[in-house]
Image: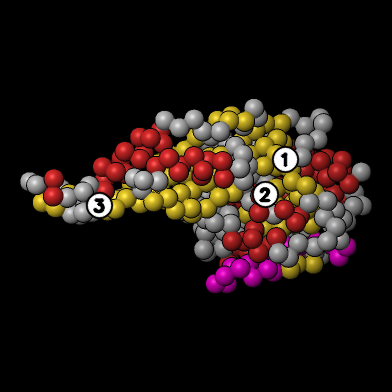
Amino acid sequence: MDPVGPLDPVALTRALVDIDSTTGKEGEAAQWLAQYLRARGYTVDEQPVTDGRFNVYAHLGVPPLVVFSTHIDCVPPFFPSREERGLVFGRGACDAKGIIAAQVVAAEQVRAAGESRIGLLFVVGEERGSDGARVANAHAPAGVRYLINGEPTDNRLGAATRGVLRVRLRAAGRAAHSAFPELGDSAIDKLLDALMVIRGLALPEDPLLGRTHYTVGVIDGGVAPNVVSPHASAELFFRIVGDAADVFSQLAVVDGLVTIEHVLDIPAVQMHTVSGFETAVFPYTTDVPLLTAWGRPLLLGPGSIHVAHTSEEHVSVDELHEVVGLYAALTHRLVG
């Protein structure tokens, strides 16, 4: 598409969706975005991450007060765009290439109204470990007051998002012939006992975000059906509402049955909100907790999280156009 012609958020969304940028393969899409923004007169910094992958940070030559941000990468599998029934389908349509498109168009509207203290930050790796956000936070420019992050929020300002805690439980046993179980020590039994204890824990609650919940996402163990299992493990993914340490400390109750390995934690976040904009809380996690050097966070984007990561991922054409106006109005309020 013409990088210097009139901006259409739908056409820009489809152009981005049609580039495969599943996590680890963001290089082509990042390069396309960098060239597109340079052609429109932005100064573009490419922040190297790994293996040809880089974040795209664009500004207008003056220190920005407000920066729009979201992620370039998508979950697999890739599938290209199509438009029907007033909806744009395709991988990344709402998570988050439609958001990239809307933020670019909104930035151009704000710029046309005479405000140049804006920036755009598009990172890699959000869907798997947020390595792009970690790099971006180490290269934040001075003076940014607000970061408007984009995720599917149905065009509502996010008041708060949950954090995450990921842990791995490992149980050790002793192998034996299943005809003589008394000669062995079942690691699977220990793991199951630990999981049952965890099911009974009273996990932390928050008046805004609700109660902590979790998923046992992966279980592995044993060597054969007729062998007492010598090893077993499980990975648990907690959606936390406060400090991860509060949940992690509760898991000590199963320490005698399993060893507990901390894998990852990202804190819950309360966002900045602005009067006159509809708000909601969201149970998912974003890059925001890892972009603390980029000012006070806000969260806003078109589309529903319920269709993100699915084979029917889509975003409404009307929502795309609406959020452009919301982004622009929000920016004027913040800099004003």
Q: Which residue is mark 1?
A: 271
- Magenta region: which residues? 46-62
As shown in the figure, which amino acid type bears the numbered disc 2?
Val
Spot the residue most to the front.
256
Residue found 73% across the figure and 65% down from its top: 139
- Position of residue 276 relative to residue 329, above or below, is above
Q: Give the residue type at disc 3.
A: Gly
Disc nearer the start of the sequence (2/1)? 1
How far across and how far down the image is residue 80, in percent? 51, 52
CB atoms at circles 2 and 1 under 8 Å apart? Answer: yes
Q: Secondary structure at mark 2?
A: helix
Q: Nearer the viewer, residue 329 or 176?
A: 176
Asked whether, in this view, residue 67 is left or right of residue 215, the answer is right
In reply to whether residue 15 is colored magenta, the answer given is: no
Q: Position of residue 43 (x, y in %)?
A: 79, 67
Which residue type does callout 1 highlight? Answer: Met
Determine crowd level at label 3: few under 14, some 14-19, many 20+ residues with C-alpha closer than 10 A.
some
Location of mark 2 (residue): 288
Residue 61 magenta-highlighted = yes
Other residues around mark 1 within 10 Å, as few (<14) / some (14–19) / many (≥20): some
Report x, y in % for residue 158. 69, 37
Q: State which tag comes first along the sequence, 3 or 2.
A: 3
Dot 1 and dot 3 residues touching (CB under 8 Å): no
Where is residue 326 shown, x and y percent of the image?
A: 77, 39
Alpha carbons under labels 3 and 2: distance apart: 41 Å
Q: Is residue 314 above or below residue 138?
A: above
Q: Which residue is mark 3?
A: 173
Q: Nearer the viewer, residue 231 or 305?
A: 231
Q: Which residue in the rendered view is the most extreme toward the left?
A: 179
Q: Is residue 114 left or right of residue 136?
A: right
How far apart are labels 1 and 3 at the CA level?
A: 46 Å
